[in-house]
Amino acid sequence: MFRELENRAILHYRIVTRSDLHIGGHTTIEPAEVDNSVIKDTDGYPIIPGSSLKGVLRIEMERLLRSLGLKICDVNAGACNECAVCYLFGGKDLASSIRIRDAVANHKRTLIRDGVAIDRKARKARDGGKYDTEVVPKGTEFTGVATIENTTLKEVYEQAKLGGLLSLIDFFNACCGTIGHASSRGFGEVDIEIERIQLITAQDYLDGRYEGEEYLKGGDEYDELKSNAIADWSGFIKSDGHA
């Protein structure tokens, strides 16, 4: 699938938190100042790991396509390498077409939220059960970059992979998608926005046009690209062997 570089889509994305967000991790070997700290980069900015975002999106797509009656493998039982999800997110022996870099917050500010572990039998706070959690506050913006290698599927659906990811993000946002810890407590609601897309081909490389074609959100060309890409993904999904 990747012996040749037909094209590469580069998506510049923004994540806005709609509630407090906690994705845990320690960035130092020193004792933590809070029980559950937020993962940060080496400059101290909170991050959303690309692997976390990719995992959430993969699971969302698996559930969505299964509900439509499509043949989707169980990655925990060994991915099949041939279903629609594997073509985008990778399989047992198939490299992922989608690569998502860490998203970095636009500020370093965090908050501390207190919590208490409850003894269900006694129906009261458990002894020694108080803990605190560091969170990134509502309204924080994260920025990052995702890439898609060779967007064509079955030779005729030229932007199918791009359409699969864009439509998945729209669905995720429409359903108040969440990421990170304690979503049942209201943490982790986010919106994912694609700010601009670059499409780069091998011919662009030969011509020295290393930025390729750029499509800005809100422009007619962007809307046309997105519409055509989603139509390609829909056509691929409905094609023989997937529906």
Image (cartoon, helix red, strand yellow):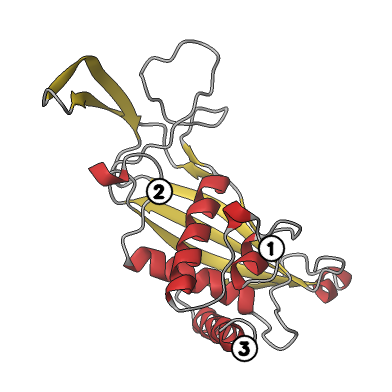
Query: Mark 3: few, some, or many residues within 10 Å (few <14, many ≥20)?
Result: few
User: Which residue is painted at 46% across and 10% down in the image?
Assistant: 31
Residue extending farthest to the left is: 123
Residue 97 - label: 1
> In which quadrant will I find the C terminus?
bottom right
**Callout 3 touching callout 1 (CB < 8 Å):** no
Query: Mark 2: few, some, or many residues within 10 Å (few <14, many ≥20)?
Result: many
User: Which residue is painted at 17% across and 28% down in the image?
Assistant: 120
Query: Mark 1: few, some, or many residues within 10 Å (few <14, many ≥20)?
Result: some
- Quickly name the residue at label 3: 239
Residue 179 - label: 2
**Amino acid bearing label 2:** Ile
Alpha carbons under labels 1 and 2: distance apart: 22 Å
The x and y percentages for residue 228 are: 56, 86
Alpha carbons under labels 3 and 1: distance apart: 20 Å
**Amino acid bearing label 1:** Ser
Query: In the rendered image of this protein, does residue 1 appear above or below residue 106?
Result: below
State which tag comes first along the sequence, 1 or 2. Answer: 1
The x and y percentages for residue 214 are: 63, 72
SS class of the residue under badge 1?
loop
State left or right for residue 138 relative to residue 195. Answer: left
The x and y percentages for residue 105 are: 45, 41
